[in-house]
Amino acid sequence: MSSAPETVSPRIVVIGAGIVGCSLADELTARGLHDVTVLEQGPLPAPGGSTSHAPGLVFQTSPSKTLTAFARYTVEKFSALEADGLPCFHPVGGLELATTPERWADLHRKAGWAGSWGVRGELVSAARCKELWPLVDESMILGGFHTPDDGLARAVLASRAQMHRAQERGARFLERHTVTGIDQQGGRVTGVVTDRGTFPATHVVSAAGFWGPVIGRMAGVDVPLLPLAHQYARTGPLPQLAGANDPRTEASKPILRFQDRDLYFREHTDRLGIGSYAHRPLPVDPFAVLPYDEARARSLDMPSSLPFTEEDWAPSWRDCQELMPALRDATVDEGFNGVFSFTPDGMPVLGESRALRGFWLAEAVWVTHSAGVAKAVAEWIVDGHATVDLHECDVHRFEGAQRSPAYVRERGAQQFVEVYDVVHPLQPMEHPRPLRVSPFHARQQELGASFLEGGGWERAHWYEANAPLVEGAESRDPWAARHWSPVVAAEARHTRERVALYDMTPLRRLEVTGPGALAFLQRMTTNNVAKKPGAVTYTLLLDEKGGIRSDLTVARLAADRFQVGANSPADQVWLERHAPDDVQIRDLTSGTCCIGVWGPLARDLVQPLTRDDFSHEGFGYFRAKETYLGHVPVTAMRLSYVGELGWELYTTADLGLRLWDTLWAAGQECGVIAAGRSAFNSLRLEKGYRAWGTDMTEEHNPYEAGLGFAVRLDHGDFLGRAALEHLPPPRRVLTPLLLDDPSAVVLGKEPVYAAGDAGAPSGYVTSAAYGYTLGRCVAYAWLPPLPAGSAVHIEYFGEKVPATVAEEPLFDPKMVRIRR
Ligand code: FAD
Ligand code: THG
């Protein structure tokens, strides 16, 4: 067990017997943990949470590989589960309709994700849609996406079946036990208090669905989710469906989405069930939800089902009648506003809280993903890590500024609004903005920055001030041209030819100090960081199974003081969890700032500002110095994610503007420009520098990710080392591709077909960007090992785009540009 005190055998209490709690009890007991108690405030097996009324549509395909994997596992598991002689999953298939050209294009993109993540699916004609769903008006439809393995989960049956299996293995399910408190001692959870007694526990998992924030408050843990009501209605019996379906299985036509009007449909024998996301967001205070008996007494079906608001439904009903003319004679017999959870980014919240050891969250989970989530959380509790990459679901993925109740409310409601929208991968949130700005923000605005948002930060993607540098007009398809400008090419070229300033403030910086700091970083990371002060080392954080948790730069600034360049907020939590008492870890990001000064003229720009020696001999590659540039104390690190000569220059936030102005003034002679993240991303891909979370995750080991050079097996034991010694030969490797057509681009997540692939693709693109120096789009992809020169093709909006496996590094293999 990763987090239980060694001597105590695990005693697990799960709060909530919805689909997540039941699945989790099943997965935990299947892994040999038998002391599992599930506490549920309502009556079993339909206790009145979101699961009790979920219509159970399972569309597996998502832009997230992780969510898709969760859904695939749920389908696989529920298909093999039975209750009352009925399977818990009914594979009627799924059909998504396009009635606008934009949606039709988006379904092509979605078909790509399905291919990339291993879901069977096919784009079909309007006529085929009509065949699959005779009630629809074919003349409205441009086409559809048909996924034969999607279908209906019977959520209450699946809860029961999993509950029974867990009970057979020793789990206890206690209904009508309302949790009222969480006991803790010394930062660890010790038990769960209910209205019927206290239950001691080494591990508590809150699977309380949208009540998560209520349980969280008892534990002193913020749970970033917003409960929202969502409308679901059933028609009266439809003559068109009379006799169409067996009442036991209820449905035979594919589950149906009409996203252009925020609607979905399923059959209930001879009626239709219709869900709508078209209405205004209807937030619900989880603290004010009625207990089960009180809800019943007030003639609610259950606590999570609120009265139907006719006025919100009316426009959707007209949209239903437009799509299905037969509904013009139909009535809506029953409807309710059902409550479930939305998070600021639409993803679940999973993991052990940093505020209270042993207190876990498994919330904001759809039925669709429930079994996959339960398996992952069980693995995480039992083994210390899951087999699927969880970084997008980690409760610690949120920045401080993303955890306020105001943010959770605003973003949660927006997720509801956007649930069926066509969302561009770069599309920034609109509100609340600006949230976090670097000290250079005013200067960036003066230069006409186009800002996108990431981690709450305003990030300049390019600057209109550089428009005069544009040579020739590159044209792009309208989708790839969104959140992009031809100025990006000019900024990339200028960085390769002259010099540019990059705002690197959002790069996470941790300070690791104390007498144990060196030994700690040696034990936590793969490379040897025991170098003299002034050295910077590129190194990896691995989990026990050798998966990459993060990639870091570690600068030894003094004997027991290190500055670590990191990725996700979860990196700090991971390090803190493993840190002994003589090590302190502090996040410096918000109080400091960083400018990357990169390009062949970087030294000409910086050297005159300092008495320190910034020559190649005086300030070598991957070295750090604390010095002054003009009036500004800086930590300078000679490294460059864009692959050019130069430095990252760090100072405190108060001096940031002064640093920018100093560099800007000094750079006028060299023709300095400010350059944005789009150029940055292009340049780093040309150089083959991986981005953690996109190119590689915990699912990948360093060797298959092409990062073996950052692993020193001879530097002593480190976390994950043992696993690296027993690796099978890689089945897939992170592979650089160059698109053959110099004008073609792809954006990421597209399926890749190697020669001989019939049907399923061999792999998928991680990140991609046009390489302005190479004159080709660069795409990295997970593929089986293929020799350089192999021809592949990438599927982009249904088009086959030819590409060739390239040899790394694609740009400056001898490193002459950086080491000079
Ligand atoms: P729940 O089922 O809500 O379970 C949480 C349990 O915790 C509850 O039983 C509750 O009583 C218990 N609990 C809470 N507080 C306490 C306490 N203090 N003490 C003891 N017990 C407590 N998802 C899909 O995948 N497909 C769909 O088609 C779909 N359609 C939906 C339609 C509607 C109208 C709604 C509302 C939701 C829909 N969902 C759908 C979402 C899905 O229903 C939920 O995301 C899912 O059921 C959540 O499961 P859960 O186990 O996390 O939560
Ligand atoms: N700067 C700093 N820290 C960081 C990043 C950064 N930490 C997180 C993330 N970015 C780490 N990623 C990289 C990737 C590549 C390099 C640096 C950080 C890099 N690699 C060289 C190479 O692969 O050739 C050198 C490797 C070596 O000499 O060991 O420069 O942007 N501060």
Image: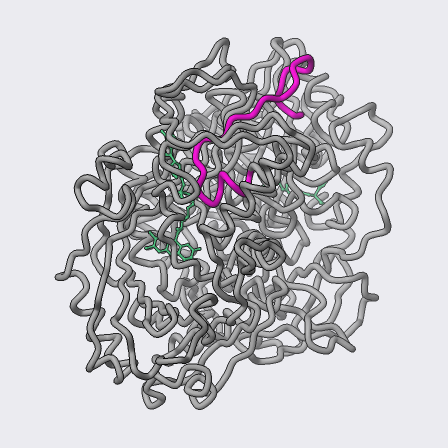
Viewer can see residue 683: yes
> Could you say where residue 28 lies in the image, as x and y percent from the top left?
62, 35
To which quarter of the image does residue 551 belong?
Answer: top right
Q: Residue furthest left?
A: 311
At 56% from the left and 62% from the top, the residue drawn is 748
> Could you say where residue 448 lies in the image, as x and y percent from the top left?
33, 55
> Could you say where residue 567 lies in the image, as x and y percent from the top left?
55, 38
Ligand 2 image position (quadrant): top right
Magenta-span inclusion, residue 562: no
Q: Looking at the image, is 446 positioned above or below residue 90?
A: above
To which quarter of the image does residue 165 belong?
Answer: top right
At 41% from the left and 67% from the top, the residue drawn is 482
> Could you say where residue 42 lies in the image, as x and y percent from the top left?
36, 36
Position of the C terminus by quadrant: top right
Viewer can see residue 647: no
At 42% from the left and 29% from the top, the residue drawn is 590
Seen from the viewer's position, the closer of residues 501 and 784 is 784
